[in-house]
Image: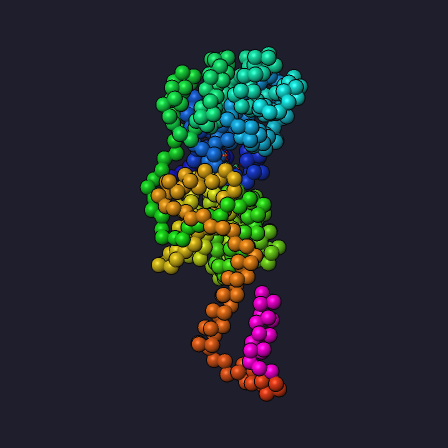
């Protein structure tokens, strides 16, 4: 299936450049459905939850339609929480960084209202806020929504759950009726559908279609880990499991580059592939990976899709993928030919919701594991070393070394002392 790409979308050069800077390689499924429709001016009901790229799905078309010269609110985004409002504002700022100055203001309860009033007076293009506080400003006359052309209800189901229904309806009634209304919600309850009937104009329901997929038999685990700890946890897992051929997935090109650099600094043999590399560069990395000259391949979904990755011992989802199907494609790279594969997923903050979705969709249970401590690593490494010693005694020709040990015994050392000294040397070096 040929998916629409960002470059084929009817969006400005400035936004495309920002998308490139963010390292988004291709639109997520909800983006490829929603962006073209929204650009046509249609009302949308998008069934998508956090982590699917829904913010950019409404953010890109909204930014595309802003007139920077007119400094009155042209778009309003309603969010259930302060955190989400801030997050959405940040994402829009990143997407608009090459545009003429676009003023984006998050307003939410808990923040001093006077400060917000001051910022509003300076002129704002896009308001992002919680319904209660937005309504408060409207009633005080500090927020004029008569020029609003686009409204987004982000996480509409959450807003209803939090008791914002009356506030939402109050706001929607006040905004000019000749407007575009985009509603996003993870679930579609009757109440939501009622709202869409009342406040949207012939909306299109956009839902990402799922094919039935079977998940191969793979040992799947996940770790709750803060983003800044992911590198450390990855290193620990690679070391503990003594993994020599691993594939690590990141969600963006920038994160691939960054992780390759960080792993190199830690002494791993690593290579990265993503869509910014030429075919030749990618071939070189792949050939090194196949020949075992690099042990870890870091990739984006798009780059990995086009290549024949050999069977790997473990797949790491350094980021939870933006789409359930990507998860299945990613982990399918391990556990082939009857071998047991491992799939490790790193979950940070709200990514847990995406993971729940993936489990529901793939009908598999992904087990949570504790992040191994340094002590655990030492214990496991010790176990591995003792195993290797046993195998060596049972299977290898040790005559030459036995002579050397006998030489040491002749001058007065005993075999326990000699073995202990050797172990200290080997473990110290490791
Ligand atoms: P959201 O669902 O909007 O909360 O987005 C989840 C995360 O995915 C955010 O960190 C976005 O920056 C990121 N993201 C959005 N679109 C894409 C894309 N097309 N490719 C990779 N990452 C994306």
Residue 147 image position (x, y, % from top left): 55, 14
Q: Measuring 48% from the left and 59% from the top, which residue is drawn there?
A: 241
Residue shown at 37%/46% (left/top)?
A: 364
Residue 55 in percent (x, y) is at 50, 31
Nearer-the-camera pick, 261 or 380:
380
- The image quadrant where one finds the C terminus is bottom right
Residue 222 horizontal/vertical position (percent) = 46, 48
Please identify the quadrant where the N terminus is shown. Answer: top left
Task: Read off the magenta span.
Answer: 413-430
332 up-or-down from 12: above or below: below
Viewer-closest of 322 and 195? 195
Q: Residue at x 60, y 25 (%)?
A: 110
Q: Quick one: 88 or 403, which is closer to the camera? A: 403
Q: Quadrant of residue 412?
A: bottom right
Q: Is residue 178 magenta?
A: no
Residue 381 visible to the viewer: yes
Q: How is the image coloured?
A: rainbow
* Vertical relation: 244 (above or below) 71: below
């Amino acid at each position: 299936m040929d998916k629409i790409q960002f470059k084929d979308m009817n969006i400005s050069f400035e936004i495309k450049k920002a998308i490139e800077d963010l390292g988004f390689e291709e639109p997520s499924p909800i983006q490829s459905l929603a962006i073209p429709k929204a650009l046509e001016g249609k009302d949308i009901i998008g069934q998508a939850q956090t982590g699917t790229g829904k913010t950019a799905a409404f953010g890109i078309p909204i930014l595309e339609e802003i007139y920077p010269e007119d400094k009155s609110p042209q778009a309003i985004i309603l969010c259930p929480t302060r955190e989400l409002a801030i997050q959405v504002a940040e994402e829009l700022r990143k997407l608009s960084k090459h545009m003429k100055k676009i003023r984006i203001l998050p307003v939410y309860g808990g923040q001093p209202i006077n400060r917000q009033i001051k910022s509003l007076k300076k002129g704002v293009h896009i308001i992002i806020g919680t319904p209660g506080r937005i309504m408060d400003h409207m009633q005080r006359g500090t927020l004029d929504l008569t020029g609003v052309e686009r409204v987004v209800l982000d996480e509409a189901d959450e807003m209803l759950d939090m008791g914002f229904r009356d506030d939402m309806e109050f706001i929607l009634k006040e905004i000019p009726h000749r407007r575009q209304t985009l509603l996003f919600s993870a679930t579609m309850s009757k109440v939501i559908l009622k709202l869409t009937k009342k406040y949207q104009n012939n909306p299109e329901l956009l839902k990402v279609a799922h094919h039935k997929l079977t998940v191969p038999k793979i040992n799947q685990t996940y770790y709750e880990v803060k983003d800044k700890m992911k590198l450390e946890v990855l290193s620990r897992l690679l070391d503990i499991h003594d993994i020599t051929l691993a594939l690590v997935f990141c969600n963006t090109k920038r994160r691939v580059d960054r992780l390759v650099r960080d792993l190199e600094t830690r002494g791993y043999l690593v290579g990265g592939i993503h869509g910014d590399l030429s075919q030749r560069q990618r071939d070189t990395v792949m050939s090194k990976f196949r020949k075992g000259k690099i042990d870890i391949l870091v990739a984006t979904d798009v780059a990995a899709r086009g290549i024949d990755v050999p069977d790997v011992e473990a797949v790491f989802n350094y980021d939870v993928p933006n789409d359930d199907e990507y998860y299945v494609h990613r982990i399918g790279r391990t556990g082939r030919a009857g071998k047991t594969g491992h799939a490790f997923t790193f979950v940070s903050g709200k990514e847990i919701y995406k993971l729940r979705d993936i489990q529901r969709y793939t009908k598999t249970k992904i087990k949570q594991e504790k992040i191994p401590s340094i002590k655990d690593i030492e214990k496991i490494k010790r176990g591995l070393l003792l195993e290797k010693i046993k195998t060596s005694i049972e299977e290898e020709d040790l005559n030459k070394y036995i002579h050397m040990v006998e030489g040491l015994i002749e001058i007065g050392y005993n075999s326990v002392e000699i073995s202990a000294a050797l172990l200290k040397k080997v473990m110290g070096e490791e």
